[in-house]
Amino acid sequence: MKRLKLFSKNKKKKTEILPVANSGETSVAAITDDNKKPKSAAGTPVNSKIYTYEHGFDRPMLIIILLLSLFGLIMVYSSSYVYALTYHGNSAYFLLRQARVLILGILLMLVMTRFGYKIIKRFTVLAYLAAVLMLIAVLFFGTSEGEAQRWIFIGPISFQPSEFMKIAMILIIAMISSKHKHIIHAKKKFWKSTLLGFILPAFIIGVSCLLVLLEKHLSGTIILFLIGFVLLWCNGSPKFWTISLTAIGVGVIAFVIFAVNQHPEEVKELVPDYMFVRVDSWLHPENYDELGDLWQTIQGQIAVGSGGFFGRGFGKSLQKHLFVSMPQNDFIFAIVCEETGFIGAAAVIALYIAFVVRGLYIAKNAPDVFCSLTAIGISAHVGLQAFLNMAVVIGVIPNTGISLPFFSAGGSSLIFLFFEMGILLIISKYTPVEESKLKNNIK
């Protein structure tokens, strides 16, 4: 590595450390003062902080991911063995399947940490276009499961394109925000900032949500919209639009609740039945059969309430004995509450909070806007999806079929989740270094 000369005429001036391409174990760039235009080691102007590639990925985040995965694997077995024995003749059916996918996902995540984030950025546009094409294809060639047509089968492999769209949408919005960051952050260029920082990302979010909604995948649509909203709030675009969007969103929710509550027949004619039933059964459970549309919700709440403070004990759930339908999936948190009680539920919630906090720490220390927004988007995805799943289980919001990250039994969805974790750990490798340490590295 070539020697770099460090110029600093005034020690009191703020120093910036700037990123350059990785070469070997450590990436280093020149230090400049505030009166000079920042330049990299190659002499090209840059305008962000200096980062190094020498520390490896974030260990605390890896530990949080592994703890969530291990706890989830244990609960998949505990919640599923009755259902698995009844319908598959093997009590360990879901345990073995989840363990295989988990091992594959962790290996994928660790292999990805060997690469730099620029490889991910290079294929971002292609990934988003592929996600759009797959969502269009699933409308014509997809396989239905219940009311939703959301699965694509390629030989023995099946997956939901909506899961891939979550990460693809995060990456494309992060890339656009990074490419046009100077315009987006310029307060004097309100309309250009609005166009590139709000309207274009909002259009991408709208297209993504519409395609998923056409699959009758309401929960996926909600998650995509919320992730997109977080990115719009954090990408530096004028806050006038995000505040306005928040107000509109709250107004729409209030209007829907009012309309369903006061004029149910008129609303029923305007929206698909599955949407109306989910909202109306949440508002007026007395009008629905507890053995029909309310069965899953009621049994889940019974499981949560019967857990008490310490729980019934691992493996001793009563509701998993075919009362909670497929307890290893969307309602696995109900079994967690029943068997481990308030203590176990609080531990799970604490792990998700730790994940989000550490993800935001990685975002704060990311080398550029692309990495920062990507880390924020991934953290928001896991945090929001976990929150919504728990809210559904305890009856705070209507039942929308949202899975619990790292816990709900799955195949391709878990692989996509660990793909996201791999990207997050890649970004975590780029951490700031002190000036004194930088000088020691380039001597």
Image (tube, rainbow, N blue to C red):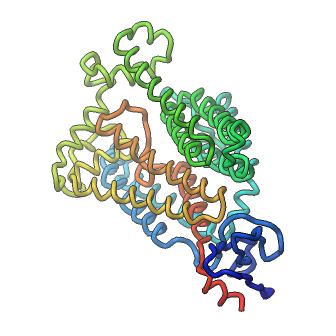
The residue located at (27%, 20%) in the rendering is 289
Q: Quadrant of residue 212?
A: top right
149 above or below 257? below
User: Quick check: can you spot residue 307?
Assistant: yes
Instruction: Give whichever of 352, 184 is nearer the camera.
Output: 184
The furthest residue to the bottom: 443
Screen quadrant of the N terminus: bottom right
Left or right of 301 in this view: 349: right
Instruction: Give whichever of 131, 388 is nearer the camera.
Output: 388
User: Quick check: can you spot residue 172?
Assistant: no
Expressed as whole percent of the image width and height from the top left, the position of residue 318 reads 21, 45
The residue located at (60%, 54%) in the rendering is 374
The residue located at (19%, 42%) in the rendering is 305
Instruction: Give whichever of 380, 382 is nearer the camera.
Output: 380
Expressed as whole percent of the image width and height from the top left, the position of residue 306 reads 17, 44
The residue located at (68%, 65%) in the rendering is 48
Left or right of 148 in this view: 46: right
